[in-house]
Amino acid sequence: MLVKHEIKSQLAKLLATEDLIVENKKVETAEFNVHTRVLTLPRWEKASNNVYDSLVAHEVGHALFTPDVNWRETHKIPHVFVNVCEDVRIEKLMRRKYAGIAKTFYNGYHELSDNDFFDLAGKDISDLNLADRINIHNKIGNFVDVSFSDAEKKILSLVESCETFEEVLDASQTLYEYCKDEVNSQDQDSGEQVAEAEPTENGNEEIEGSGQGIATEEEGEFQIPESSTQGSSQYDPVLEDFEDMDMDDPTESDEPTVETADALADKLKDLINIDGLENRYVELPKLNLEDVIVPNDDIHKGCDGQWVDSIEFNKKYDTDKNIFEDVDTEYIQFKREAQKEVNYLVKEFECKKAADSYARATTARTGVLDCSKLHTYKHNEDLFKKVTTLADGKNHGLVFILDWSGSMHYVLKDTVKQLYNLIWFCRKVNIPFEVYAFTQEYPLVKYDDERKEMRRSTPYTPKDNLAQVSDGFSLMNFFSSKVNAKTLDYQLKNIWRVVESISGHGYHSTVQDVRQMYGHICRFRTPLGMNLSGTPLNETIVALHQILPKFKIENKLQKVQCVILTDGEAQPLRYHKEVQREWDDVPYLGTSYFGSNVFLRDRSLGKTYSFSSMDVYSDMTDIFLENLRDKFQDMNFIGIRIVENRDAGHFVRRYTGYEGDYYEKVMKEWRKDKAFSIKNSGYHRYFGLSSKMLNTDAQFDPNHDATKAQIKRDFIKSLKGKKMNKKILSEFIELVA
């Protein structure tokens, strides 16, 4: 069974308290970059869970505790000896730092021992040098017997007592010199045996000392070729080896080695999956908000300019009649009718706030006698006055994101009505708010001093493995709580006009087109840059990483809610990717789509998010939302999805599955109320609303010639609409409060 290395919960726990980033790539050995804080691990996909966990825990130990120092300048020790001693220290510190890690090491090394990863089969452990025995004693000593002499026990104790890397270097030096003395002693004994060798009757030489005849090379001694003859020209394998050897080269055979460490490294390579695509780790760019957000004042100045042009244009073809009379009257009427809905929201909010405060209230004795209870002193010990302290209410704030894409054309006005209700609610209960509409149409240009021209600025510096945010992406700041009530009302009226210009006459229509279609001229045009466009929702989520904390700090808030009103899926993001082309000297920075080998990496959290199971574009949005939720755990993210009847079942199945109680529950709610809420999406709560039920007015306005039966049906229908709205709005307010 392949290990899902990117989602190992244990690894996440190990790294949670450290500023570390983990990458799983096609490498043979682990490495840690102390500057970037990136721990690169081999793809041990063929390892079991126990082995994988222990290996990761070990490498994390190196990342956390092994310093980035050039110790080779002061200590002439082979790296393997330092690594043996350092392994002992970092695993000891990991056991000390993380509860339960001892069991992880135990299970992992048990499996490695059972599968002979240290290559001990058929060997006498006592014949291994001290470094090898210390290595296996501290790794698999629970499963094999390892003996030490009194002198060796002192070195073992020295290694196991190391607390700092400097102590590791000293212990490594002692261990290395001891093992080197062992090798030199063996070489000296071997030389003496060669010198004492005497020819046998058949002309060959026999080495004294073993008493067991000639051994094979695999057994640790030399076998003399039968063709060798006696004399100065004879073939002497021992002497020949020494003649070919560079005596000053520490890598030759007179140097001690750690065979068990080499064996483990070789066999771990067999667990690595080197096939398939290389993993890519993509990060979100930090956007310059000035290059993304169209200021509130600029939006409405643009509207005002367009209204002036429309008035002048209409004077050429029409009378001096106020071209905004009808649409403004409609706005005023809606505002008046919406107050009941707004008041209901305010009442629900205040009640839920009060209920929460009282639920968290504390009662304490004051130490002051309650004179009204003195007469009960014989049977009552509670004679003191009490005081109830209500928990302080929290400062709330709301950020609204409005879908300004082309698919919103037919439901835009009703969606804006919902938004206006929420804005008026915020105004009444003094909740700070900001409203942004995402678009790819607004010409957010600035004068470029270097190029001496007006141009769109890229809101970040593109680089390899960075998510791409298109230059055309903008957030139009329609409304803000920073303006006074009079200004806000005018701005609400402005956007109402914009919506009417889009909904009434088509968002790309010219005056001539409209005259041909409707038989009259367009009363007013959509302001420049405010036509409907694509769906850069994912780009918006990237921008929220800067918008939300800025909004919270500026308004000194404790609780922030982010509400996204949309009707469809976001367009997919791409990421920047360096490609070395044959005809270029430097890599070309292109782009690529997110795939199964791509992971979103958040350095601040030490987490990665996989796109391997992404089937539809909404999955990408859910992943970005999950990251946003992890990043800002004190904030709520609420989705309001406008759903067509034909799409409801497909949309619900995406989060509930095709069968089961939860699916049936949500669909029953939809069939009854034409609305539902889902809890297991990328949002904390995802509300689905029928496009036909969005009208919050639910007005009872029968025709003058309607029958009694028709009047009755219309009345019941209006009541159902109000009931549905109140149910959804109540659930929404509960989240906010």
Image (cartoon, rainbow, N blue to C red):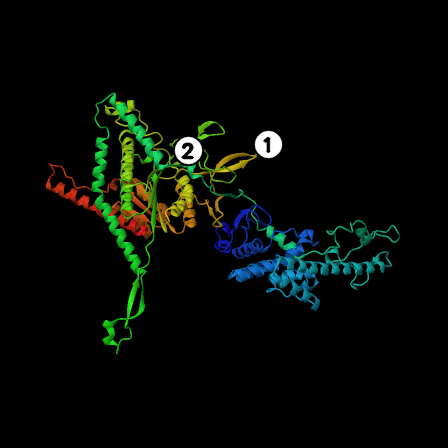
Along the line of sight, which residue is nearer the eye, 719 or 225?
Answer: 719
- The residue drawn where x is 61% and y is 58% is 87
Residue 526's place in the image compared with 544, above or below, is above
Residue 350 in percent (x, y) is at: 27, 53
Q: Residues within 10 Å of mark 1 (few under 14, many from 20)?
A: few
Label drawn at residue 656: none
Residue 294's place in the image compared with 59, above or below, is above
Q: Quadrant of residue 473?
A: top left
Which residue is identified by label 1? 585
* 71 sits to left or right of 379: right
- The residue drawn where x is 24% and y is 73% is 373
Residue 450 can be seen in this image: yes
Q: Please count the marks in the image.
A: 2
Which residue is identified by label 2? 472
Residue 623 in percent (x, y) is at: 42, 45
Q: Quadrant of residue 337?
A: top left
* 667 sits to left or right of 707: right
Instruction: Give SS at disc 1.
Output: loop
Residue 405 can be seen in this image: no
Residue 158's place in the image compared with 464, above or below, is below
Disc 2 residue type? Gly
